[in-house]
Every structure is written in C-alpha cells, then in structure tokens.
Amino acid sequence: MLRFEPSVRIVYFSEPLSLALHMASVWALVSARAVVVNSIDDLQHGTTTLHGFSLALDLDTEGDRPEDLPKLHGYLARHLPPGYEVLLERDHVHVEWDMHRPRPPAPPAPAKPA
C-alpha cells in the first residue's frame, strides 16, 4: 500500500513518476510494509533536486522503520531503469528521474576465444 502525507502535491503526473510509485507499491506488497510518500512536488527542497518539477519523490515506510529503508532502497535501485537515481538518505529514500543524466557505461564485451 502507498500512503501519501497530506502535504504531498503533484503538479504534473508524469510517466517516470508513475513508474517510481508503481515500483514502490510493488515493494510494499512483497514486503508487507506500507510505503509513505513524504514529498513529491513541494516548495521545501532546494534547487539541487527535481522536486519542483514533479520528477523526484521522498519515500519512507509506515511507522518510520529505519531497518526497512535499505531494503526499499535496494529494491528500487535494482528495479528502476537507467535514468533514475535512488539515494538512501538518513531518514528516507530519495528517487529522482533525470533524463539528462548520462547512462552508466556498458559492461565490456566478453573476450573471444583465440
């Protein structure tokens, strides 16, 4: 289950935001822990994040369970495609979609047998 804090607002509901929320809800279902959406498009964040453009969100778990944050972070980092940045902060998981972020380098091709 996803639970939204009353102060959460979304100016533009984009596909990248939808995918991040979808994956958070999948983790909540699998782990049996509700995910709390603390922030999306608010005026509380500085200019270094994409919160002001509805391209970033802050997530926590129901009851502020710090032991769940690394699990939520790991799941989202593994399952969201390139272009998403997933950061484990002190008291929440920050997810941000930046279409201008360079893709990680491709792994080297396997060596051909001689």
Image (tube, grey):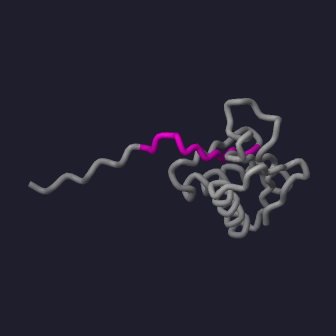
Q: Is residue 75 left or right of residue 10?
A: left
Residue 32 visible: yes
The relative height of residue 20 versus residue 92 in the rendered view (above or below) is below
Magenta stretch: helix, strand or loop mostly: loop
Residue 17 found in image quarter: bottom right
Looking at the picture, how far across and down is residue 81, in whole percent?
53, 55
Q: Quadrant of the N terminus?
A: bottom right
Residue 45 found in image quarter: top right
Q: Quadrant of the C terminus?
A: bottom left
Residue pictured at 73% horizontal, 64% vertical: 28
The mark tally for this picture is: 0
Residue lying at the far top in this picture: please name it: 47
Q: Which is more toward the observer, 85 or 14?
A: 14
Residue 91 in magenta stretch: no
Looking at the picture, how far across and down is residue 44, in whole percent?
82, 35
Q: Which is more toward the observer, 88 or 10?
A: 10
Looking at the picture, how far across and down is residue 47, in whole percent?
71, 30
Residue pictured at 68% horizontal, 36% vertical: 49
Residue pictured at 73% horizontal, 38% vertical: 90
Looking at the picture, how far across and down is residue 9, in whole percent?
83, 49
Which residues, given as a range, are shown in magenta?
A: 92-104
Residue pictured at 79% horizontal, 53% vertical: 37
The relative height of residue 33 versus residue 73 in the rendered view (above or below) is below
The relative height of residue 108 versus residue 44 in the rendered view (above or below) is below
